[in-house]
Image (spheres, rainbow, N blue to C red):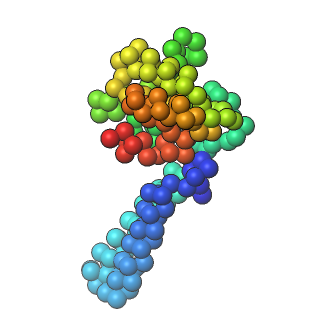
Amino acid sequence: MKRGNEASPEKGRERRLCLLWFVVFTLLAGGYWPSRLGLAFMALAYLGVLHLAMLVFDEVTSPQFHADMSPEEFERYCASLLRERKWDARVTPASGDQGVDIVADKRGLRIVVQCKKYSKPVGNRAVQEIVAGIAHRDAQRGVVVATAGYTASAIKLAASNEVLLLHHSELHRIDRLLR
């Protein structure tokens, strides 16, 4: 299963570790069966299977990116990805949002996010709006999430204002990228 259009590298690594856990403890259980140690190893193997099942369930129920989603659906999709990362993310009302589509809080950090579902690279205006949104929403950081990349001038302006520019497939790494 893929998360959106991209498989999360962390999830793939975690799945492989769960499978390794299961195999190792199943083999150990077989070697010590039916002793108490064998039962303990079998219980540990079972925990690995449960964790793997939870990972698969999360992937199946995770929101999926679709190229035909509306801009509003894209905003909700981005907010749900942030919530998966334990952010308290709220989509702002469409009118009067001052260029801020999502306000998200986590451990005392507030970010404002502008979501751009464009077929062409995003320009300076989105960066200018999110810089204004940082002050307007009393946030510490601004993020622009796009589907089609950014112009060179938008990248330069974002760097000078510490605005994070992301492709939607990078949202799973937002905590690391905000450091």
If the image is split into quadrants, where does the N terminus sit?
bottom right
Quarter of the rendering containing residue 51: bottom left
Q: Residue at x 28, y 29 (%)?
A: 108
Q: Nearer the viewer, residue 158 or 92?
A: 158
Q: How many marks?
A: 0
Q: Residue at x 41, y 14 (%)?
A: 136
Outermost residue toward the top? 96
Q: Nearer the viewer, residue 107 or 118?
A: 118
Q: Nearer the viewer, residue 40 or 162?
A: 162
Q: Nearer the viewer, residue 44 or 19?
A: 19
Quarter of the rendering containing residue 20: bottom left
For residue 159, above or below residue 6: above
Outermost residue toward the bottom? 31
Q: Residue at x 67, y 35 (%)?
A: 120
Outermost residue toward the right? 68
Left or right relative to 74: residue 141: left
For residue 55, above or below residue 155: below
If the image is split into quadrants, where does the C terminus sit?
top left
The answer, for residue 44, to whether it is visible in the render is yes
Quarter of the rendering containing residue 162: top left
Task: Give coordinates of residue 135: x percent, y percent.
Answer: 38, 16
Task: Give coordinates of residue 16: x percent, y percent.
Answer: 46, 68
Task: Give coordinates of residue 171: x percent, y percent.
Answer: 49, 42
The answer, for residue 79, to whether it is visible in the render is no
Task: Give coordinates of residue 113: x percent, y percent.
Answer: 48, 28
